[in-house]
Amino acid sequence: MKIEIPNDVLERSHLSENELRLELGLFLYQKNIFTLESASKFAGMDSHQFQKKLGENKIPVHYSIKDFEDDLRTLNEPL
C-alpha cells in the first residue's frame, strides 16, 4: 500500500519526509502495531539508532518476561 501526503500538508507539519517517517514509526511502535525491527525499517534506520530515538522520546522498549527468559537461557548456554 502506498500513502501519498500532499506537499502542503507536509509543509504545514514543518517535518521533512524522513522526520515524518520517524514520527510515524515511533507512534506505531508505541501502540504495539510495529515491532522494533519493522518500526526501525520504516523509519529508515537500524534498530540501535531507533532505540536511541525511543529513549529520546521517553518511549519504553517492549521487553516481555518471555524475552527476558529467552535472554537468560542464551546467556547460560555454554560457549
Image (tube, rainbow, N blue to C red):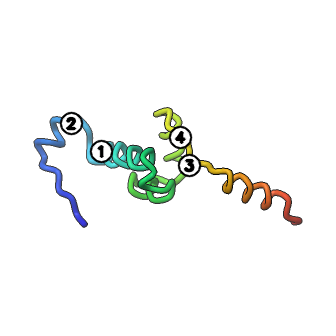
User: Which residue bears the numbered disc 4?
Assistant: 52
**Are the residues tagged 1 and 4 within 8 Å (C-beta)?**
no
Look at the numbered disc 2 and give the secondary structure of its residue: helix
**Are the residues tagged 4 and 3 within 8 Å (C-beta)?**
yes
The three-letter code of the residue at mark 4 reads: Lys
Q: Is 1 left, or right, of 59 in this rendering?
A: left
Specify the label residue 20 is tagged with: 1
Residue 58: % across, % down: 50, 33
Task: Using a 10 Å C-alpha cutoff, classify the residue at mark 4 as few (fewer than 14 neighbours), some (14 to 19) or many (20 or more).
Answer: few
Residue 50: % across, % down: 49, 47
User: Of label 1 and label 3, which has the lower sequence position?
Assistant: 1
User: Which residue bears the numbered disc 2?
Assistant: 13
Q: Which residue is outermost to the front?
A: 65
Specify the label residue 40 is tagged with: none
Please say if 47 is above or below 10.
below
Alpha carbon separation for disc pair 2 and 4: 23 Å
Task: Using a 10 Å C-alpha cutoff, classify the residue at mark 3 as few (fewer than 14 neighbours), some (14 to 19) or many (20 or more).
Answer: few
Q: Residue at x 38, y 44 (%)?
A: 27
**Are the residues tagged 2 and 3 within 8 Å (C-beta)?**
no
Alpha carbon separation for disc pair 2 and 3: 27 Å
Say which quadrant the N terminus sits in. Answer: bottom left
Alpha carbon separation for disc pair 1 and 4: 17 Å
User: Which residue bears the numbered disc 3?
Assistant: 48
Please say if 71 is above or below 8.
below
**Are the residues tagged 2 and 4 within 8 Å (C-beta)?**
no
User: Of label 2 and label 1, which has the lower sequence position?
Assistant: 2
